[in-house]
Image (tube, helix red, strand yellow):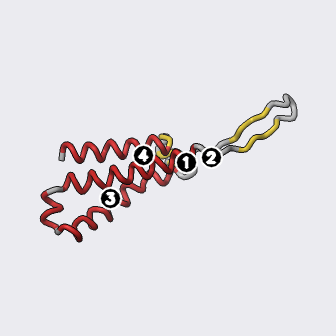
């Protein structure tokens, strides 16, 4: 069983960016500063990547679908791909990651 549909795997981008982003903070500001301001480093990465995932999900959702004609009823049927991560649409998954980032900024 897959936990994503379409480009839903992009919902994992914030976790990948977090692992590299914290390393980037350490290389720029130093390990002591990053450990002292851990919530700032984590929160910034999650908020930025959450916005990126939200924008990607929004763009993918707005893509036109295929319109097919049912020969029996002469009705039009639109087929669109779903882009979900753990059954959550990708643009909402982006908002979830922004929420994680805000939590890190406020409470860590």
Circle 4 is placed at which residue position? 94
Classed neighbour count for the residue bearing mark 4: other residues with Cα under 10 Å, few (<14), some (14–19), many (≥20): many
> Of helix, strand and loop, which one carries label 2?
loop
Query: Which mark is first along the chain, 1 or 4?
Result: 1
Frontmost of labels 3 and 2 is: 2
Q: Are marks 3 and 4 in contact (CB under 8 Å)?
A: no
Residue in the image at 38% along x and 53% along y: 49
Query: Which mark is first along the chain, 3 or 1?
Result: 3
Q: Which mark is residue 63?
A: 2
Residue 15 lies left or right of residue 78; in this view the side is left
Residue in the image at 28% along x and 53% along y: 44
Q: CA distance from mark 3 to mark 2?
A: 29 Å
Residue 15 lies left or right of residue 104; in this view the side is right
Circle 1 is placed at which residue position? 59
User: Which quarter of the picture shows residue 14?
Assistant: bottom left
User: Which quarter of the picture shows residue 82?
Assistant: top right
Q: Are marks 2 and 1 in contact (CB under 8 Å)?
A: yes
Q: Which mark is residue 24?
A: none
Q: CA distance from mark 2 to mark 1?
A: 7 Å
- Residue farthest toward the top in the current orientation of the protein: 73
Residue 52 point in image, percent of width and height: 43, 52
- Closer to the camera, 82 or 43? 43
Frontmost of labels 4 and 1 is: 1
Compared with residue 82, is residue 26 higher up or lower down, i.e. above or below? below
Residue 89 point in image, percent of width and height: 50, 41
Frontmost of labels 4 and 2 is: 2
- Closer to the camera, 97 or 56? 56
Circle 3 is placed at which residue position? 18
Residue 91 point in image, percent of width and height: 48, 43
Residue in the image at 78% along x and 34% along y: 76
């Amino acid at each position: 069983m897959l936990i994503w549909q379409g480009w839903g795997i992009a919902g994992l981008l914030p976790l990948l960016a977090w692992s590299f982003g914290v390393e980037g903070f350490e290389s720029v500001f130093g390990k002591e500063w990053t450990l002292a301001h851990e919530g700032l480093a984590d929160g910034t990465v999650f908020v930025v990547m959450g916005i990126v995932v939200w924008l990607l999900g929004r763009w993918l959702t707005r893509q036109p679908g295929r319109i097919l004609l049912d020969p029996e009823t002469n009705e039009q049927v639109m087929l669109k791909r779903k882009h979900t991560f753990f059954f959550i649409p990708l643009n909402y998954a982006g908002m979830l990651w922004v929420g994680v980032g805000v939590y890190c900024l406020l409470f860590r």
